Image (cartoon, helix red, strand yellow):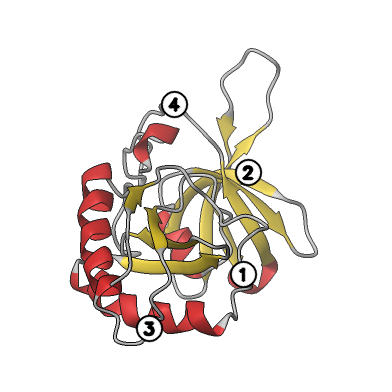
Amino acid sequence: MSNAEATASPDHTGTGSASEPAHNPEAARLRGLLEPAVQANRLYLEDVAIIPGSHRVVHVVVDLPQEETGGVGLDVIADISRVLSDVLDNDPNDDGRPYDLEVSSPGVGRPLTEPRHWYRARGRMAKVNVIQGENVTGRIQAVDDGGVTLVPEVAVKKGMKPRQGEPVKLPFDRIRNGKVEIEFSHLPEDGLEPEHNGPSEEA
């Protein structure tokens, strides 16, 4: 049995350059091992990476299902860490090397590159990099299978409150990526879900 240490790691948004490539066979094997336990706890397994060394680190990123809003709380991170630690301790194919287990959520700084990322960011302000067109900054009003609808913010004179433009629908095939803009508060708008949008929301 390996010595597993479950560590809640809030706001860890990436695995860093020291992590092994995503196609690493051992990381893929562990993903298959851990995913059922993550899903059983109503979470989504975003990523599994292995940071090599004499004492390797298994880094697991979990998120809420795409239909839910908000962030993964620290208590949830702690609970799922214990569950995944037990799974790894009972891994029938484990080679006996010691490891540390780190579990975190994606954090507010995660790039929006997949449809599920956009679903999770509904109601937030985001900057969108558009393919063959002008980039758009606006609040994510709706997401469907075809793309994202944003309410853009129109530039105004310095010191004035930004003005909202007409909703814009961007199909996914025109979106290169997006990034949530940090806000500490915003007033609810028609058709938008009121939600705190500060960094403390994400675990």
Sequence-wise, the earlier of marks 3 and 4 is 3
Find the distance from the CA under tag 2 to the CA under tag 4.
17 Å
54 versus 88 height, above or below: above
Report helix, strand or loop for mark 2: strand
Residue most toward the right?
132
Residue, disc 2? 137
Position of 42 with respect to 187 (left or right) is: left
Q: Is residue 61 visible?
A: no
Structural crowding at the residue carrying mark 2, measured as other residues with C-alpha within 10 Å and reported as few (<14), some (14–19) or many (≥20):
many
Callout 3, which amino acid?
A: Gly
Residue, disc 4? 184
Callout 2, which amino acid?
A: Thr
Please provide percent x and percent y for residue 62: 37, 61
Callout 4, which amino acid?
A: Phe
Q: Residue 20 got which mark?
A: 1
Sequence-wise, the earlier of marks 2 and 1 is 1
Sequence-wise, the earlier of marks 3 and 1 is 1
Find the distance from the CA under tag 3 to the CA under tag 4.
38 Å
Rendered-image quadrant of the C terminus = top left
Callout 1, which amino acid?
A: Glu
Residue most toward the top?
159
Report helix, strand or loop for mark 3: helix
Sequence-wise, the earlier of marks 1 and 4 is 1
The residue lying toward the viewer, choosing from 72 and 180, is: 72
Residue, disc 3? 32
Find the distance from the CA under tag 3 to the CA under tag 1.
17 Å
Report helix, strand or loop for mark 4: loop
For the residues bearing labels 2 and 1, Cβ distance under 8 angstroms: no
